[in-house]
Structures are given as C-alpha cells and as structure tokens.
Amino acid sequence: MTKISAKTVKSSEVVLTELMIPSYANFGGKVHGGILLSLMDKVAYVCAAQYCHQYCVTVAVEGVAFLNPVEVGELVSFKASVNYVGKTTMIIGIRVEANNPRTGETKHTNSSYFTMAAKNEQGELVEVPSLVLEDEVQLRRFCEGKMIKAFSAEKRRLLKADLEDAPLHDRLQMCNDERCQIEFVSA
C-alpha cells in the first residue's frame, strides 16, 4: 500500500456560481431550499473528489442553516473546502452567498457541512490524504470538524440506544407536553 501524501486546504477549494432561474422558485417565489441543497451536494462532491482524486459519496449533511432567502435572478456562489479529514472521510464546509447583480449587495444565505467518503472502483472505502493546516482559521475549522464528527456519532448512538429499545411507556411519557395526539392502542 502506498503512502498518501498530505494536501493543503487550498488544494480543495471550489467555488460554483449559478444564476437562480424562475424554475428554481418555490410557491413563495423564493429559491427552493431543495435546489440549494442539491447544489451544495454537487459542490461538496467536486471539492472532495478534487481533494482525494477518488469517487466520493455523501455520508451525512450536518448543520444546514438557512439564514436568508435567495431570490430568483441572484447569482449564488457556493464556496467549499475540506475542513477536516478522517481516515476515509472528509468534512466539507460550504458557505453560500447570494449576490444581487443590480444592486451589488451580497448576503450570506446558507452554511453547511457535508461528510463525504472516498471509494475506489470496487466501491470500497479508501484512505484520503491528510490535511495540511496553514493558519489559525484552518486549525479552527479542523477542530470544529472533529467536534461535528463526534457530535454526529453521539447523536446516532443516542437515538439508537435511547429510542429503539425504549419501552412504550417511556416513549409515551416523552410526548406528554408535546403537540401530538396518540390515537393507537398498543397490543
């Protein structure tokens, strides 16, 4: 097995800019969040594949925050870079900004983290290059990525352990002060 060399964050950076067209609009006249998520997934793939020179798949989407609406006619830029690497996965940070070409105003509309895994031609996970951190911002983002990975694993563990095997009584009690009506009879 050959040793994979380290790569810089800069080598992973990708910017995709796209015009928001009328067919992207939702019923409220704004760009549909699903369109933005699809474009974020695309830029996350390009960023990850460019970094590791492998086919990559989306493993998880963490922390999608819709901060401001995107209007039809705006130029939206998706800025992505590898923030964290594990053995076979990468966390891609994405910042989305919308620019109104008539006014020149730019607004931050979305942020997100995509966990991508590298695979070979046989579909097996493969090791990715280690990440060279060249400044404090990159170090902070790497540490945030490590925390995101840990929080994500803990969330999956808690949901599986706490709810999957929880007695019906415990699940019913969790819903006591919630806005739901339970209308089934348990066997």
Image (cartoon, helix red, strand yellow):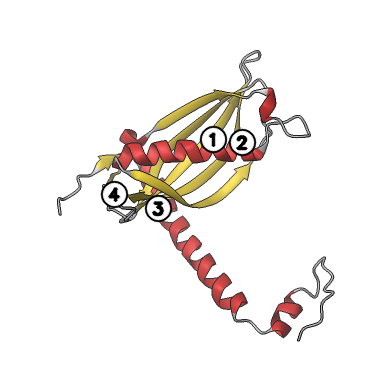
Residue marked by disc 1: 39
Q: Are marks 2 and 1 in contact (CB under 8 Å)?
A: yes
Residue that extends furthest to the top in the rendered view of this protein: 102
Q: Is residue 120 left or right of residue 171?
A: left
Residue marked by disc 3: 143
Q: Are marks 1 and 3 in contact (CB under 8 Å)?
A: no
Earlier along the polypeptide chain: callout 1 or callout 3?
Answer: 1
Q: Amino acid at mark 3?
A: Cys
Compared to residue 39, the image places residue 150 above or below, namely below
Residue marked by disc 4: 128
Tell me the quadrant of the picture where the C terminus can be found: bottom right
Return the x and y of residue 156 as percentages of the image width and height.
52, 67
Compared to residue 38, the image places residue 142 above or below, namely below
Residue at image coords 76%, 29%: 29
Nearest to the eye among marks 3 and 2: give it.
2
Tell me the quadrant of the picture where the N terminus can be found: bottom left
Give the secondary structure at mark 3. helix
Q: Which mark is residue 35?
A: 2
Label 3: few (<14), some or many (≥20) within 10 Å? Answer: some
Residue at image coords 51%, 25%: 17
Residue at mark 3 to residue at mark 4: CA–CA distance: 18 Å
Return the x and y of residue 181 as percentages of the image width and height.
84, 70
